[in-house]
Image: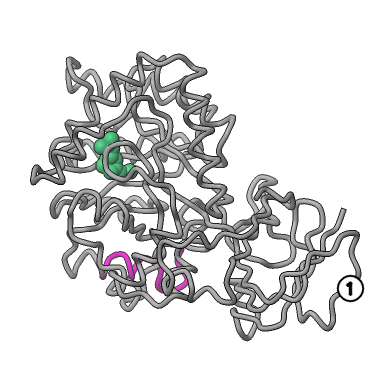
Amino acid sequence: MSILITNIGELTTNDDSLANSRVKDAAVILDGDRVGWVGSAADAPAADELVDAAGRAVLPGWVDSHTHMVFAGDRTAEFEARMAGESYAAGGINVTVSATRAATDDELRVNLQRLVDEARRGGTTTMETKTGYGLTVADEVRSARVAAGIVDEVTFLGAHVVPSGSDRDEYLSLVTGEMLDAVAPFVSAVDVFCETGAFDAVETARILETAASKGLATHVHGNQLGHGPGVQLAVAHNSLSVDHLGFLDDKDVEALAESWRNGGRGTVATVLPACDLSTRMPLAPAKQLLDAGAVVAIASNCNPGTSYTSSMNFCVATAVLQMGLTIEQAVRAATLGGAIALGRDTERAGKPRVGVIAPGARADLQMLGAPSITHLAYRPGMPLTAAVWAAGRRAV
Ligand SMILES: N=CN[C@@H](CCC(=O)O)C(=O)O
Ligand SMILES: [Zn+2]
């Protein structure tokens, strides 16, 4: 089954082999679950089905590379207290851990599916989610299993905090031993919250090294609540990404940029604008990172504590309006940037690449109710997602 989407006013491809990544009067053919052809509408071959974009903009579906969506409960009271002047502390995580442990598998599944459906309606076609609200072997395994049945990429975040009542050394041995082995069949990566109140530099290094020794990719939550060693550790351990980045010094920015020089595959700097706003923390210096040569991703960090939104439209608009990115930079960071942060920018183990509209890539596209991507920031807060195709199927 092939679908020709024609009469596209502006097509954003992220395909660097094309002279211009914002193509006018374009067309795309979806061939099953892959992109089959991209070009000028005038040259488009025939297909089984025709969709007239009527001059609207088409771009890759959002790739949300950082969420924590396997949870139960709600943290409205904590949010209200924060808006009244209290500051965010990692301790709130244990509130969600208690609620998550008390939930049934079905309740976790239904809540995760609800959030994924919301994200899909907002144009997201690839989603990562983390465990990290179970923090026992059994609860982390079921979080990973539930997530693996619903989202594209699952990350093990047993190293979120040391759960209340646990001995620190025993918990670290669990996270790097029995718990990691038990979740490994369901996950592709391991994450660590490297922060005061969570895990320190020595503990983070131990977790990253153990994950790598088992063939798993790594991510780091770093430099979220203050300046810390997260960025340097992530780069030194060749992590796929380091995320948050509200407190960076020049050496951190340079390390992230340097990691991509000389053809190296470095560490993506993932910024989380909705989280920065919801925690009233400094915005990550996304423009400085890009200007230095780092690869930047934008993600929602959807979770009940620090960022209860999956709206990538909101994140992109904030990155443009408040972080100083151009619209092209923000859209690229929220699509191809996320794909690179997940190691999904190339075909891997039979999984097609995502984050681009190019022949062979997964057929993940969104159409805006607007003629150009500029409207994502020009008309912030407006419901601009007009249509979504996920793996070639019309999803919205
Ligand atoms: N910082 C660590 N983890 C989450 C927050 C989790 C929570 O507060 O429930 C984050 O990315 O912001
Ligand atoms: Zn997070």
Give the image's coloring scheme.
one colour
- Say which quarter of the image contains residue 299: bottom left
Please give the name of the residue rendered at 14% of the width and 36% of the height, measured from the top-left corner.
197
Horizontal and vertical percent position of residue 386: 61, 60
When the figure is inspected, residue 12 is found, relative to residue 184, above or below; the finding is: below
- Say which quarter of the image contains residue 76: top left
Can residue 205 be seen at all in this image of the molecule? no
Residues shaded magenta: 254-267
Q: Pick out the residue farthest to the left.
A: 85
Residue holding disc 1: 45
Q: Nearer the viewer, residue 143 or 190?
A: 143
State ligand 1's quadrant: top left
In magenta stretch: residue 260: yes
Amino acid at circle 1: Pro
- 338 left or right, relative to 94: right
Horizontal and vertical percent position of residue 207: 31, 35
